[in-house]
Image (spheres, coloured by chain):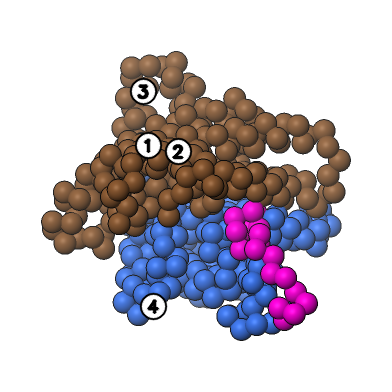
Amino acid sequence: MMSETSAWVIFIAAIFTNNILLTNFLGMCSFIACSGQIRTSLGLGTAVTFVMIMTTILNYVIYHFVLVPLGLVHLQFIVFIAVIAAFVQLVEMFVERFSPRLYFALGIFLPLITVNCAILGASLFMIIREYSFIQSIGFGLGAGIGWAVAIVLLAGLRQKMRYSNIPEPFQGVPIAMVVTGVLAMAFMGFAGMVSIQ
Amino acid sequence: MADKQLACMTCEPKGLCGGRGLLTLKEGAWANNPLAIQILGICSALAVTNRLENSLVMGAALIFVCVGSNLLVSLLRKRTPHRIRMIAEVAIIATFVILFDQFLKAFYWDMSKQLGPYVGLIITNCIVMGRAEAFALQNPPVLSIVDGVANGLGYAVVLAIIGFFRELLGTGEIFGYEVLSGQWYTPNQLMILAPGAFFALGIVIGIFNAIKGPVAEEKK
């Protein structure tokens, strides 16, 4: 179905026109919770991008070379989430052992990523849209970067918003939502650039 | 989180629900509404609410998964080693999500297509996990079911409200029937697109805050 689209197009589309956060609403929990400061959100964005591309690749291989031949496709949810959880744990141990500095920079974000639905969502979209291996890599990378871009943008906006006079019931999360809506509207401007389903 | 308090209040083992059934129901569905007050599980709340029908199915899915996983986690709570409880919870939740997904695929193929990956994403929905972790682990099975129903219901109702307004304003229809006549109402496409979801949820949370605000202060 998507076999003729090049991985590059999917990569660009995943960042701009089909931003996993602003059009598919994935990873909202940590998006709202961790967008207080630009530095923090940049760290989280990096960690998410890395985990996302690695887990899409892993899940692609497992889905097409283990689950499909064995006829166990209905188990994809549980397998995917197990792969993600195991991978995050592994990365955490690895980073802690070999790069303590990186561990302190990313460390606290890693456990959060397991429950970030953008990661699982990227794997599920990859299966539903029937991407090839190369396309999956493009999609995983693009989706991760797109998510990171969105959270950094919101963090910047929220830092400015601290000085604004917002009606009391709307302070905090509600106004963040509305601002995200405006952000999503701005991203809709990219719509004509490339398109994937 | 406020859940801790709730869990402690309901621990007393008197009767099936410890005499706290109604309170649990009220806490979950209204006072601690998972979506509007605790801001959990908003991904799916934004994604599937472009039509009322989708919102209702998603609400039903969450009630089913929440009740099922709460019951099972609660039944197994004394046999689950503390260290691996998280992965056990995820496995239990995933089981129920797979059940619901297969059910949709078997009987409501179109709906399953429309919801796409969002049914699978219930696994990472913080509400289900949160209830299993904060409530079912410390409470008897029957009370956990009540809690599952309450939180599922709280989620489903907010979802239905958002879905209702988005479909109404976005297409002028409800369940595909024309409500706002095309003669005088121009459907606002923005409402069914992504930004409309953010606006709608932001406003709903804002309204909840406005209503709940003074009440929450009184409690303290």
Camera-nearest label, 4 or 1:
1
The blue chain is B
Mark 4–mark 2 distance (CA, rounded to whole Å): 34 Å
Name the amino acid, label 3.
Answer: Val
Q: Residue at x 38, y 52 (%)?
A: A125
Q: Quadrant of residue B74?
A: bottom left
Q: Residue A133 at what x, y percent from top left?
A: 25, 42
Name the amino acid, label 1.
Answer: Trp
* Element assignment for label 1: helix
Is B105 positioned to the left or the right of B41 in the image?
A: left
Mark 2–mark 1 distance (CA, rounded to whole Å): 6 Å
Q: Which residue position is annotated with label 1?
A: A8
The earlier-in-sequence mark between 3 and 2 is 2
Q: Which residue position is annotated with label 3?
A: A95
Q: Which residue position is annotated with label 4?
A: B108
Q: Residue at x 58, y 37 (%)?
A: A151
Dot 4 falls on which chain?
B
Camera-nearest label, 3 or 4:
4
Q: Is residue A158 visible?
A: yes
Q: Which residue position is annotated with label 2?
A: A12
Q: Look at chain A in the picture and name its colour.
A: brown
